[in-house]
Image (tube, rainbow, N blue to C red):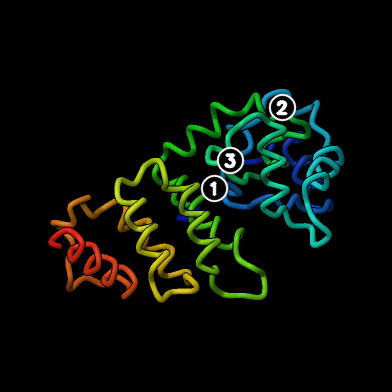
Amino acid sequence: MPVKKKRKAPGVAAAVAEDAGLKKCKISSYCRSQPPARLISGEEDFSRKKCLAWFYEYAGPDEVVGPEGMEKFCEDIGVEPENCFPSDLCLLRCDCTEKLQSRFDFLRSQLNDISSFKNIYRYAFDFARDKDQRSLDIDTAKSMLALLLGRTWPLFSVFYQYLEQSKYRVMNKDQWYNVLEFSRTVHADLSNYDEDGAWPVLLDEFVEWQKIRQTS
């Protein structure tokens, strides 16, 4: 039996109609599926025009917030870069520093939620790569991994050392996704690593490299 659609309240319908005709804020799209009702308080004070103007204070000519812009953004809102992740300011109904700071508790909860963090981590790959490239250059990959996993993955410093001395000059999307899965499922002593599993060669070689170091 078809699911009966709920009728939207007039105010919500008007907001949706207005959003459809305006330019999208490009800081991110990872939380697009979250219903605005969870995030918004006092949204009648929100100005999309002001939000976009605020965004362009940090964006470059290509309408993308680069590393320098993100660093300035983190400095302005008063958080360390490793605690700052891209989010859709328009969805959050944030058009100034003060409003974003008032949403910090919600944003931090997203980092602690496994599913939400996975979406953030996956979004970070496309956010950080050059738009004409399909992979991340290895230096950018190391920097992004430091931000995302540096404080939570016991093997991160070892993996970072491995990347520095490895033959790899780029990291593709499959490798990027699997690094997160590896960090969540493989023990720090590598005792449960399955050599016959479907891991990328990059991780197979990392495990081999680390085991040699442990026995030498």
Tell which of 198 and 40 is nearer to you.
198
Residue beneath label 1, please?
Answer: 4
Counting other residues with Cα less than 10 Å from the Cα at mark 3, is it few (<14), some (14-19), or many (20 or more)? some
Counting other residues with Cα less than 10 Å from the Cα at mark 2, is it few (<14), some (14-19), or many (20 or more)? some
Which is closer to the viewer, label 1 or label 3? 3
In the rendered image, the quadrant that contains the N terminus is bottom left
Q: Could you say which disc has been placed on residue 81 in the image?
A: 3
Question: In percent of the image, x 83 and y 51: which residue is there?
Answer: 22
- Horizontal side, residue 165 vs residue 173: left or right: left
Which element is circle 2 on?
helix
Tell which of 191 and 100 is nearer to you.
191
Question: In percent of the image, x 18 and y 66: which residue is there?
Answer: 212
Q: CA distance from mark 1 to mark 3?
A: 44 Å
Residue beneath label 2, please?
Answer: 99
Q: Amino acid at mark 1?
A: Lys
Q: CA distance from mark 2 to mark 3?
A: 19 Å
Which element is circle 1 on?
loop
With respect to residue 216, does 132 lie above or below?
below
Q: Could you tell me residue 157's position as x and y percent?
A: 36, 51
Q: Closer to the N terminus: mark 1 or mark 3?
A: 1
How many numbered marks, from 0 up? Answer: 3
Q: Are marks 2 and 1 in contact (CB under 8 Å)?
A: no
Which element is circle 3 on?
helix
